[in-house]
Image: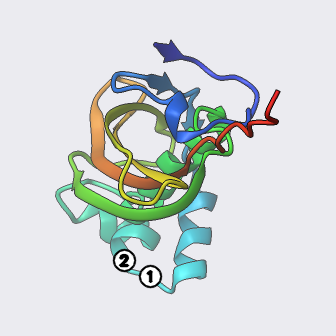
Amino acid sequence: MTLSGFNRLRRYFEDFAVGDAVRTPGRTVDIGDITTFAGLTGDHYPLHVDEEYGRTTRFGGRIAHGPLTFGFAVGLVALSGFLGEAIVAFLECQHLRALAPVRPGDTLRVHAEVVESEAGANPGYGTLRLDYSVVNQKDEEVMRFRMVLLARRRPPVEDNGA
């Protein structure tokens, strides 16, 4: 099932099947995002904050930080409501690849798909693995990674002895 966005629902681990996916709306990256990220993290590398320096590089100008692109991707999926309130913890990010530069003015969208679910030993939680593909306005993939998330399982139904 592919969802384009919906209200945050009370979702549980059991509500996700392999193949369930979401395509998010877009979000345009601007210079202010890049500058703010540099200030928040202390990462003032010239490629991100100095246009003149950026012009001397293979990119021909400033580009967004890779972790900023990652953050936007995670945020876009969160804003979509796809995960609802099921997720209780971020466990791991695997296989992160920055594939193309993200430039000021680029509009990013994410396709996230459940590729694995594992109930695990703890009856209260299960593990979900989702592949994220981040694309720009030209449908060029700029980043991909796998998120490993801990999801709340549905509480058992109480038997009232009826």
Nearer-the-camera pick, 89 or 97:
89
Disc number at residue 74? none
Horizontal arrangement in the rendering, residue 102 relative to residue 81 (left or right):
left
Q: What residue type is disc 2 on?
A: Pro
**Circle 2 or circle 1, nearest the eye:** 1
Residue that mark 1 sits on:
43
Indicate the quadrant where residue 39 lies: bottom right
Residue 102 appears at what percent x and percent y? 37, 48
Say which of 57 and 131 sits in front.
131
Where residue 162 appears, x then y in whole percent?
Answer: 82, 26
Q: Residue at x 44, y 54 (%)?
A: 149
Q: Nearer the viewer, residue 123 or 99?
A: 123
The residue carrying mark 2 is: 46
- Estimate the x, y position of residue 32 in percent, counting from the top left: 63, 60
Residue at image location 44% in from the left, 24% down from the top: 21
Residue 72, above or below 15? below
Apparent side of residue 111 relative to residue 71 in the rendered image (left or right): left
Label 2 environment density (alpha carbons within 10 Å; few <14, some 14–19, many ≥20): few
Crowd band around label 1 with a 10 angstrom C-alpha radius: few (<14), some (14–19), many (20+):
few
Residue type, label 1: Asp
